[in-house]
Amino acid sequence: MPDFSVITQNLPYLLWGRALEGQPGGLLLTLIMSLEAGVLALVVGVLLALAAWLSGGWTRRILFAWADFIRGIPLIFVIFWLYFLLPSLFGVNLPDTITVVLAIAWFTSAAVMYSTLAGLEALPKGQVEAGLSAGFSRTKVLVNILLPQALPNVLPSLVGVFISLIKDTSLAFIVNVPELTTVAGQVNNRTQIYPTEIFLFTGAVYFLLCGALSLTVHLAGGRRARPA
Amino acid sequence: MTASATPLIELQNVHKWHGDLHVLRGIDLTVSRGEALAIIGPSGSGKSTLIRLVNRLEAISEGEIIIDGVPTARFAGRELRELRSEIGFVFQQFNLYGHLTALDNVSLALRKVRGVPRAKAEARARDLLDRVGLADKAGHFPSQLSGGQQQRVAIARALATDPKIVLFDEPTSALDPEMIGEVLAVIRELPKAGITILVVTHEMAFAREVADRVAFIDGGTILELETPEKFFSAPSHPRTRRFLQQVLSPLSAAEAS
């Protein structure tokens, strides 16, 4: 029989690590990292999509090459690179948590760029022509007419991207950042005989987290929806 | 026709190529202030391209377009945007901004291009919606309006910046037949208010009743440019005669060929 008392005994550590000593960990750190990386990836990804939409020729090709490059390598390598390269190449010594957040944001921004750009380009060409013939510049067409229509349309795909992002924070365990997966591993190493209980619990927490995000957006979207 | 010393629009030897395709082959055309010009012709004749060149939704390959005495063919950037904001354009597919209400569709350019304060822009938009008979639909989104209502909002939107010229690209071609009348009724009021209109259309009755002159385009050339009376009663070019027969009595034209 599984014995979940190992969870209740270690619950504070799994949920917020050593937050009381000023070092947030566990679920709390997972949430903080997800939020930071998510906001960063959204802003950077949307800006990249706008730049790609506005530009042609080489600028656009470079943006796509950049996004394809980052999409084509496993996230774990991006984390390793930033973790080892930033200090050795540039002498920068960022906190480990920040390094991982940057890696995840960088990685995810490519997916945000692709989704957003697809949403912009799926809008009828007539929307652009209507804006241009009213005297809008291309940038103003983009900001006032296209983006407000594209973002709600790509919301489901962005939610998918952010669900991946939440799960991707678990890769921080390879550089020992004490988020949920790392602290679960620590508890498992310490107690030795309850891996089933610990990792069932950890999996359930990720599931609830992603499910809650999905449900929130679904409900918020339902309220805002206009008759189509 | 209100004749004036200087023409409002003057096209001089205008050419348009799409790659190897020679869409417009040296168009010369003069439109007076307050004139209503109907442009008709078979599909692919270049008639839509012609009006899309006037507000430069398409680039001019060769030639000049003089508007109100100013050559505009080389306009770019701010100059071009200012020119466009002084010319209304109404599309076949309406192209209302899908995320905005009728009121916001009409007031958006006033606010964001002309910098008019919101309250003033919305007051103007309400006036215009009232003028096209849609005062009660100000808060509706395009998806909640019929095709005819959407096109009337689009006309109000085209009028928002008080243009001297409004271009219509087949404004009734995407409408159900019972809605065509309400849109044409709005369009016919514009020349009475001194607005010059160029209307690409398949509505022969409209061309006959509203237009001061009718231009017939085929193969990228203006073959005929006449008052409606002469145009419909005694067309001079054989291709005009054939086209008129095809659109006015399509079945007999098909049987004859």
Image (cartoon, coloured by chain):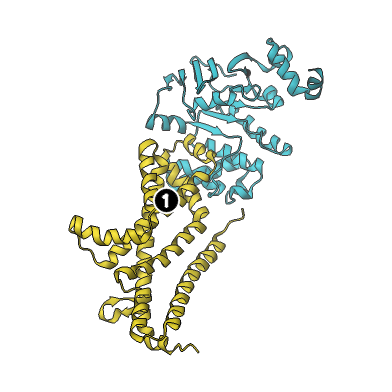
Residue situated furthest left in the rendering: A91
Name the residue type under label 1: Met
Element type at mark 1: helix
x, y percent for residue B133? 63, 42
Q: Is residue A82 left or right of residue B131?
A: left
x, y percent for residue B1? 60, 18
Q: Residues within 10 Å of mark 1 (few under 14, many from 20)?
A: many
Residue B60 versus residue A93 in the image, above or below: above
Q: Is residue B64 visible?
A: no
Residue B58 versus residue B140 in the image, above or below: above
- Camera-side residue of B165 and A132: A132
x, y percent for residue B170? 62, 30
Name the residue beneath numbered marker 1: A113
Residue B41 versus residue B108 in the image, above or below: above
- Camera-side residue of B41 and A50: A50
Chain of residue at mark 1: A
Residue drawn at point x = 78 percent, y = 20 percent: B253
Residue drawn at point x = 46 percent, y = 64 percent: A163
- Camera-side residue of B49 and B54: B49
x, y percent for residue B36? 60, 23
- What color does chain A have in the rendering? yellow
Q: Is residue B236 left or right of residue B167?
A: right
Residue situated furthest front in the rendering: A193
Q: Identify the chain drawn in cyan.
A: B
Residue B177, quarter of the rendered image: top right
Residue A184, quarter of the rendered image: bottom left
Residue B93 versus residue B48 in the image, above or below: below
Residue drawn at point x = 54 percent, y = 19 percent: B24
